[in-house]
Image: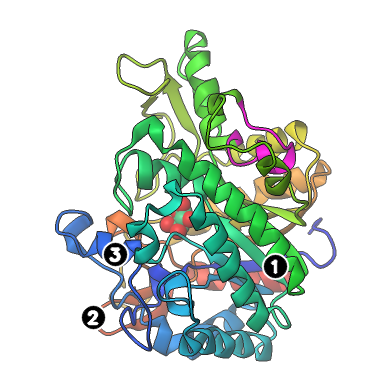
Amino acid sequence: MGLPEGFRWGVATAAYQIEGAADEDGRGPSTWDTFARTPGRTRDGHTGDVACDHYHRWPEDVALMAGLGVDSYRFSIAWPRVQPRGSGPVNPKGLDFYDRLVDGLLAAGIAPAATLYHWDLPQPLEDAGGWMERDTAYRFAEFSYLAAERLADRVDMWITLNEPVVVMAYGYAFGVYAPGRTLMLDALPAAHHQLLGHGLAVTALRGRGAREIGLANHYSPAWAASPADRPAADAFDAFMNRLFTDPVLLGRYPDIMGDAPFVRPEDLAVIASPIDFLGVNYYQPTRLKNPAEGPLPFDIVDIAEYPVTGMGWPIVPDAFLSLLRTLDSRYDLPPLYITENGCSFPDEIGPDGAVDDSSRIAFLDAHINAMRTAVREGIDIRGYYTWSLLDNFEWSEGYHPRFGLVHVDYETQKRTPKKSYGWYRDLIAAS
Ligand code: FCB
């Protein structure tokens, strides 16, 4: 109720988290294959080798989406499946997979929304320096072109990058995600080269007829632990919320980028190529205090006064609303899509065979209501994708967190819709 005509309800996933079939049909290795297969990098050594076996079971997964009645499905295209070395020839079988998936979705009345980079960089590109190298931006634009050449006749919505801040911070600065580098503040070139890749990809995609193009950023409202900690909160806000949005929407970097030698004067115009929407991924706010020591301009402190999800993330729907208001006041925004929002809980199949995930229902209900308030206030939000359709490989946490509307038994690959699946289906049907 109260949402714009044509509002899209959806679910989101990402290739490495669900597909499996890691060495099949000519797929090359990605940084996540290398990282997860390195002992000690992921919890209990879990890898995405099999994941939800979606590569083989996608018809069942499309049927689950059809049962939900979603308007759209956000998935990602694995670069190493399409272009195993990250450059050079296409792997036709890789593209064939997405071709089949897209046709299957359209036959079920579901609009495909394709993400081009959800963190699975082809390993040969990482071996050449990965996102620390400018050349990777050009390789990404080329891959985007190849994907759109095959699919843009049927895929309207394209998301270039997913959460580039996480790639820069967790992947290159802190080393807790692939590729596991610990460059701290020296990781900033990985920000610029991803953004340059985004800008170049926008042009490449338009050239192949893509209609709606944007990127999906991760946002987290920055709370100062005390009034004196405002500088820490502002610094975090610049890194987390502005570094990947100001250049795209304002054509300039926040001050933290300084006079970076790797930023060429002409790059900002490329990065600021007009986009058709901004994707917003929201999970939780972050509380900051001034740093005791260390290279970063902030320390993260616990938010203890709210209930938390299975990840320990505080549940604060009001922070989601305030984020949407902040974005709206900061920028002359294009239309927004909520490209991710969701929660993990330790869901189990009960004795009656059902999964009672009432906490997920409460989480989604409260966050969707916050979004409705933002829409009522005049913020142009066109869709909402919940993370995730299925329980899946949650990066360095392996298969422990369960984010799905559908439970997955990883021994048997049996899918069991949770209570939240029925709740989301009813919500969609009623709107
Ligand atoms: C986001 C990622 C997504 C998933 C959720 C829980 O940061 O984009 O792949 O892991 O968190």
Image coordinates for residue 406, horizontal then vertical, percent: 44, 73
User: What secondary structure is marked by label 3?
Assistant: loop
Residue 411 - label: 2
Q: Decide if ligand 1 comes within 8 Å of the CB at mark 3.
A: no
- Drawn side of residue 77 relative to residue 425, left or right: left
Q: Is residue 421 left or right of residue 144?
A: left
Q: Are marks 1 and 3 in contact (CB under 8 Å)?
A: no
Q: Does residue 98 appear anywhere in the picture?
A: yes
* Labels 1, 2: front one: 1
Q: Name the amino acid type tagged 3.
A: Tyr
Q: Is residue 70 visible?
A: no
Q: In front here: 303 or 268? A: 268
The residues bearing labels 3 and 2 have C-alpha atoms spaced at a distance of: 12 Å
Across and down, in percent, residue 267 comes to: 66, 43
Q: Quadrant of residue 9?
A: bottom right
Q: Residue at x 26, y 59 (%)?
A: 35
Name the N-terminal-most of marks 3 and 2.
3
Q: Which residues are magenta?
A: 242-254
Amino acid at pointer 2: Glu
Residue shown at 44% from the left, 44% from the top: 168
User: CA–CA distance between discs 1 and 3?
Assistant: 34 Å
Q: Which residue is mark 1?
A: 205
Residue 55: name its quadrant. Answer: bottom left
Q: Which residue is mark 3?
A: 399
Q: Nearer the viewer, residue 336 or 239?
A: 239
Of 47 and 225, the residue lying toward us: 47
